Amino acid sequence: MGEDMLELWEKAISSIQQKMKSQNFDIWLRPIECQSIADGAVTLRVPNRFFQDYVDANYLDLIRDQLRALTGQDYAIDFIISEGQGGAAEPGDGEGAEGNGARPAAAPSQAVPLPGGTLLGHLNPRYRFDTFVVGPSNQLAHAASMAVCSMTGRKYNPLFIYGGVGLGKTHLVHAIGHEIRAKHPGKNIFYVSSEQFMNEFISSVRTQKQHEFQHKYRHDCDILLMDDIQFIAGKDRTQDEFFHTFNFLYDQHKQIVVTCDKYPQEIDNLEERLRSRFQWGLIADIQAPELETRVAILKKKADEEEITLPDDVAFFLAENIRSNVRELEGSLIRLAAQASIERRAIDIEFARHVMRSVFNLSAPRATIEDVQRSVCAYYNIRMGELKGKSRQHSVTLPRMVAMYLCRQGLGASFPEIGERFGGRDHTTVMNACRKIERVWETDLAVRSAVDTLRRKLAI
Ligand code: ADP
Ligand code: MG
């Protein structure tokens, strides 16, 4: 590789370094080697597949932006893998290629009808129903997504899936795409984000190909999967265009699936008539997953990636990342990447070490209620008993342990703890804490309970 090219990469990487947390930089950017830069394409060498996925998902735009800032040119970015797993990045196959992060652009508008069975847009091969973990938080959205694939009743039209960032909306919509492709190979599936829809619409207006745009979305499309509809809020002309597309497809009994980060009524600047259209079908929400679901997601992901993930580490991660599955997966990948660099197994000490600073920054600390809940689960008693009046040993011991944890782990005050345990006097709490300290040396069961709970709660 030429000197100047090397220099370009060095420059890019050092300005990226200034924009990132140093820990993240050290883990994810420093190990990357630039293999070549030529003809608008950069090839980066990364240590393993985890790196590729993680960098692809999180840092690709940053790298690309930086190269553009330095050269005024857009670069395609490819990866090769240094060792193991085949030695080279998987070649893009058009549909499954996610290695270079460059989503294939939507097909150019054309008046000739698309051949049957066309897929417009990119479906991530990993986002399928069988890789989606179902729990109470996403059951309805999952069931409705499965139902639209059978295309019999069409009663869920449109299907509107909403929920916070990183909770699996895109995953479900891609899964619908895959499933319909498998079950109904003749159907034309359009998967687009509303942003792509808008860009394509604008460019069709500019090039006076609006008619072709309309033809494509109305006549060629059998299933419209529109991701992140919130983006078109406030974009009047795009909304108008989408409204007409929607009506056309709806009248033809074509399935429409829309995702959004909000409930229709909560999207600001969305036209009333679109809002009401969304309510014609089924609105399904995705909530943040419960602890058990989070653990199951981690285990599934670990299986897929062939990572050995001990239970206590899975719980440790799941306890600390509650509201975003993408972050949850990111933490696992991060651990795996770090473990593979250091060539060691993932165990709880290692996990605590690697994740410590991350969790301190982003995780809400455990609360008194978290402690109470974990203690109840550990001893298998009910919350009512824990806070209640029972003097039975099977309840008083957990109660003392819980009070001790609130004091030692959370630093809560004696009166506050008393208040939160059924309005007890602070002296009761002090006695409970002293009692635990007294038996500490002799009672291994208590010690192990406290240790386990502290680890689980990260306190
Ligand atoms: P959203 O579109 O809601 O922001 P994504 O669909 O992109 O979220 O999901 C973020 C990540 O979390 C993806 O890698 C996805 O596979 C994963 N994910 C989310 N929910 C689940 C689930 N229930 N089971 C398995 N993976 C999930
Ligand atoms: Mg999404």
Image (spheres, rainbow, N blue to C red):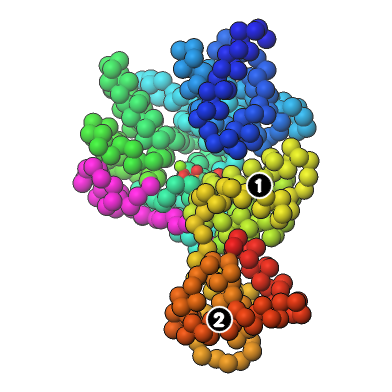
The kind of secondary structure element at disc 1 is helix
> From the image, which quarter does the C terminus lie in?
bottom right
> How far separated are the C-alphas under marks 1 and 2?
35 Å
The kind of secondary structure element at disc 2 is helix
Q: Image quadrant of residue 295?
A: bottom right
Q: Position of residue 303 (x, y in %)?
A: 69, 49
The residue positioned 41% from the left and 40% from the top of the image is 227
Magenta stretch containing residue 270, yes or no?
Answer: yes
Q: Seen in the image, is 95 located left or right of residue 47? A: left
Q: Position of residue 313 (x, y in %)?
A: 68, 56
Q: Is residue 101 visible?
A: no
Q: Seen in the image, is 129 located left or right of residue 112? A: right
> From the image, which quarter does the N terminus lie in?
top right
> Between residues 48 and 319, which one lies in front from this camera angle?
319
Q: Seen in the image, is 362 located left or right of residue 393? A: left
Q: Seen in the image, is 209 located left or right of residue 21? A: left
The residue at the far bottom in this view is 391
Q: Are marks 1 and 2 in contact (CB under 8 Å)?
A: no
Which residue is disc 1 drawn over? 354
Magenta stretch containing residue 307, yes or no?
Answer: no
Q: Position of residue 231 (x, y in %)?
A: 34, 38
Q: In the image, which residues are magenta?
A: 261-290
Q: Position of residue 201 (x, y in %)?
A: 32, 26
Q: Amino acid at mark 2?
A: Met
The residue positioned 78% from the left and 45% from the top of the image is 344
Which residue is disc 2 drawn over? 430
Work out whether 159 lies above or below 70. below
> Between residues 453 and 93, which one lies in front from this camera angle?
453
> Between residues 46 and 414, which one lies in front from this camera angle?
414
